[in-house]
Image (cartoon, grey):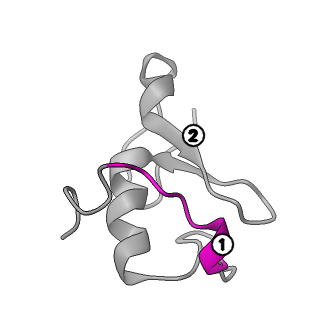
Amino acid sequence: MAECSICLAFLKDDEAKLITDLDCSNRHQFHQECLTKWIVHNDNCPLCREKINADDKPSWDNLNDTAL
């Protein structure tokens, strides 16, 4: 079972709608809420540190609502 490298909790199959792939070369998976908070302050993948282009950043509706 994979884990979210941001919060270190397991990515459960029943949470599929709350899990998202980042557009890095390895398509790492994270909880959407965790990744949303990360992307506000960082421009790289939390796991492999590959730079994420501004055009590749997810544009979720709740980005500002969940920011730290």
* Residue at horizontal 50 percent and vertical 49 percent from the top: 30
Query: In this view, which residue lies farthest toward the top?
Result: 14
- Examine the image and state in which quarter residue 23 appears: bottom right
Q: Position of residue 35 (x, y in %)?
A: 43, 58
Mark 2: few, some, or many residues within 10 Å (few <14, many ≥20)? few
Judging from the image, what secondary structure is the residue with disc 1 in? helix
Query: From the image, which quarter does the N terminus lie in?
Result: top right
* Residue at horizontal 48 percent and vertical 57 percent from the top: 59
Judging from the image, what secondary structure is the residue with disc 2 in? loop
Along the viewing direction, whichever of 59 and 68 lies nearer the viewer:
59
Residue stretch rendered in magenta on the structure: 53-61
Q: Earlier in the sequence, mark 2 or mark 1?
A: 2
The residue tagged 1 is 55
Q: Position of residue 25 (x, y in %)?
A: 81, 65
Along the horizontal axis of the image, is 52 left or right of 41? Answer: right
Q: Is residue 49 above or below residue 37?
A: below
Is residue 55 a member of the stretch shown in magenta? yes
Which amino acid type is marked by label 2? Ala
Along the viewing direction, whichever of 1 and 47 lies nearer the viewer:
47
Magenta stretch, main secondary structure, is loop
Residue 7 seen: no
The residue tagged 2 is 2
- Examine the image and state in which quarter residue 36 appears: bottom left
Mark 1: few, some, or many residues within 10 Å (few <14, many ≥20)? few
Which amino acid type is marked by label 1? Asp
Q: Position of residue 64 (x, y in %)?
A: 25, 63
Along the viewing direction, whichever of 62 and 23 lies nearer the viewer:
62
Query: From the image, which quarter does the C terminus lie in?
Result: bottom left
